[in-house]
Image (tube, rainbow, N blue to C red):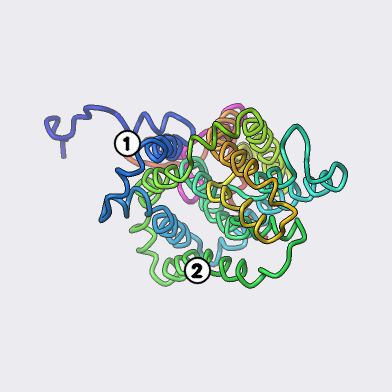
Amino acid sequence: MTRNDATDRTIVPIFDFMNRLPGGLMLIPLVLGSIVGTFAMPALEIGSFTTALFKEGALALIALLIFATGTHVTARTSGPVLAHAAVILTAKSLIPATAVVLLGLAVGLDGIAGVSILALLVAVDNSNGGLWLAFTGRYGDKRDRGAYVSSAVNDGPFLSMVFLGVSGLAAIPGTLLLAAIIPFVLGMLVGNLDPKWRDVMRSTPSIVIPFFAFALGTGIDLGNVVRGGASGLLVGAIVAPFTGALVYFGYRYVLRRGAKSGIGFAAGTTAGNAIATPAIVGAADPQFAPYVETATAQIAASALITAILAPLIASWVLKRQGGLTVVDEEGREITDEKTGATAEPPASRAGDDDTDVRL
C-alpha cells in the first residue's frame, strides 16, 4: 500500500528531532515541564483531564510503563534481569552511599565545598527510573529495561535513612517497595500467561515517556535549581560521571555486556522525587534540619543536571564503543526504524553483547 502524501506528510519532525538528542524523548518534555511548572503552574491546575495528564499523571504513566516492561520478562529471562538490577543497585546506590557515609565520618555533616553530607547522600543513592526506561527503551534490551526494578529499592527516602542510621520508619518503606514492584510482577504474570500482551504493550514506551516526563518536570522548580547555584551544579557534575561509571564497570566486567556497557552511564542520575527526601530526613532526625533547605535546592539542581548529563555521557561512550544502536527486546539491532525491520547484530558485536547471559 502506498502512503498518501497529502495525509502523511510531516510538517514539523518533532518526534525525529527528540530522538536525535540522547534521552530526548524524556529530556525535552522534562525541561518543558519544569519551565511551565515554574512560570505557568496555574494553567495546569484548571482540573479535569488537563491536570490529570500534564500535572498529576506521572505515577500512573510510569506504572503503565513498568507493567509493559514486565510483560517482556519471561521465566527464561528473569535471571538476567535480576542480575542486571542487582548490579545497578550495588553500583549506583550501595557503593556511592557507603562512600558518602565514610566521608561524613571523616569531615562531619557539613560535608565539603558547601555541599552537606545529606545533599550528597540523597543525590547519589537513588536514580531517575523514568530516564533509565527512556534510554534503555531505545538502546537496551529487555534485561536493561527490566532492571528498572532496582529503582523500587533506591527510590525515595528508604536508603538515605538506612545509611544515615535513622530508624522507626521501616514499615513504610517496605510497603512502598511492595507497591512499586506489583505492576512489574503483574506484567510478568500476564506476559507469561498470554504472550499476545507483549505485542499489545510493545509501543508503550514511545507513547507514555514524553507525557510522564513533562508531568515530572512540573515538580522541578527552576527557582530551586537557581538557588542551588554552583553547589547544585557541582553535585550534579559529580553524580553523573561518578555513579554512572560505577554502573558502567558493573556492566562491562560483571555482566560482560561489551559494546553495550555504556548504557550503565544512563543510571548516573538523581530522581526528581528525591527533592522531597531532605525534608523527610530532617523531620525524622532534627540534627539534619539545618541542612534541609540548602540540600533541597542542591538536589533539585542535581536532578535536572544529571537528567541532561547522564544520557549524553552514555551516548558518547556507546558511540565510541560501537554500541549506539537501536535494538529490540531481544537485543537484535533495528536496521530500519521507519519499517521496524530487524536483523541479528553483526557478528563482530554479537559475542561482545552476550545476549544469552544467564545466572
Residue found 51% across the figure and 48% down from its top:
141
Disc 1 marks which amino acid? Lys
Q: Earlier in the sequence, mark 2 or mark 1?
A: 2
Q: State which mark lies toward you, 2 or 1.
A: 2
The residue beneath circle 1 is 338
Q: Quadrant of the N terminus?
A: top left
Q: Is residue 291 left or right of residue 270?
A: right
- Does the stretch in magenta take in 319? yes
Q: Quadrant of the C terminus?
A: bottom right
> Circle 2 sits in a helix, a strand or a loop, which is it?
helix
Q: Where does residue 24 sit, x and y in percent of width and height?
A: 44, 34
In the rendered view, would you say 27 is above or below 285?
above
- Which image quadrant is residue 334 in? top left
Residue found 73% across the figure and 42% down from its top:
116
The residue beneath circle 2 is 182
For this rendering, which residue is in front, 42 or 123? 42
* Number of residues whose C-alpha sits closer than 10 Å to that of mark 2, classed few (under 14), some (14–19) or many (20 or more): some
Q: Where does residue 279 sit, x and y in percent of width and height?
A: 61, 53
